[in-house]
Image (cartoon, rainbow, N blue to C red):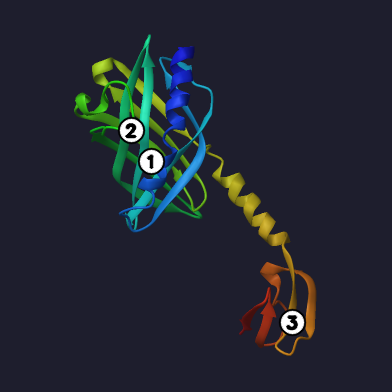
Amino acid sequence: MKKLFTLLLICASLTQGYAMNAASTGSKASKEYTDKLVVTINGESSPEQTTKIAVDTPKDGIMNITLPNFCLNAGEDMMYVGTIKVNEIPLTASGLYSTFTTNQTIQIEPGDIPIEGMWLGPMLGDVPLQMAGKISDDKFYTTIDIKMTLLGQTIHVVFGTDDFESSIHSTWAGKQTETTNVYTLQGMRVKSNVAKTHALDGLQKGIYIVDGKKVIKE
């Protein structure tokens, strides 16, 4: 099992170029998320490894994801699984992030890196998959259960961490403490070192300069 996860790490390191290409073509809005990925098979988990998942949103409320060049090791042999794509995943808005869950049957595509042998995924036919998680502009978390019926096992994949609430609160607190100066159009400073989120509080209606930009107080 140790060897399996060592080789899994090597395969994952080869996916970066593919993810970049997948995130930059053919979608309305595309993005890459880089985070830790852990794979669990038969109760044993791999060490954390940094990898990327490409996400695109072809239309509002719908998401597609790509996990490229997924590889495993079976005993002494390398098992090249392939590229996992899950499309038409519905998103549910939940405050500053969205949640998602989907049960689908997919077909795994061949990867796009040079290998010694062939990609197993396309030969597996229909593969049941369960997926759930959360997504925001700068954070992505998901669990993926891939049922390899032909191999008699389920591969459990975890990407990212489910700490959205603390991350959002931390980001908001940081913005609250950012300060700035406020000037009139004539260059007179009317406020110094005030929180950006309250820069215009208490001022009369008019146009002011905040962070070098004109801001209207109504």
Which of the labelled discs sits on residue 130, or is there none? 2
Q: CA distance from mark 2 to mark 1?
A: 23 Å
- Looking at the rendering, which quadrant does residue 12 occupy? top left
* Residue at image mark 1: 18
Q: Residue at point 40% right, 25% down?
A: 156
**Disc 3 on helix, strand or loop?**
strand
Front of the two marks 1 and 3: 1
**Disc 1 on helix, strand or loop?**
helix
- The quarter of the image holding the N terminus is top left
Q: Residues within 10 Å of mark 2 (few under 14, many from 20)?
A: some
Taking the image as shown, residue 197 lies to the left or right of residue 65, namely right
Q: Residue at point 43% right, 32% down?
A: 14
Q: CA distance from mark 1 to mark 3?
A: 48 Å
- The quarter of the image holding the C terminus is bottom right
Disc with the residue nearer the chain's start (1 vs 3) = 1
Q: Residues within 10 Å of mark 1 (few under 14, many from 20)?
A: many
**Disc 2 on helix, strand or loop?**
strand
* Residue at image mark 3: 183
Q: Residues within 10 Å of mark 3 (few under 14, many from 20)?
A: some
Q: Residue 217, image x and y in percent?
A: 64, 83
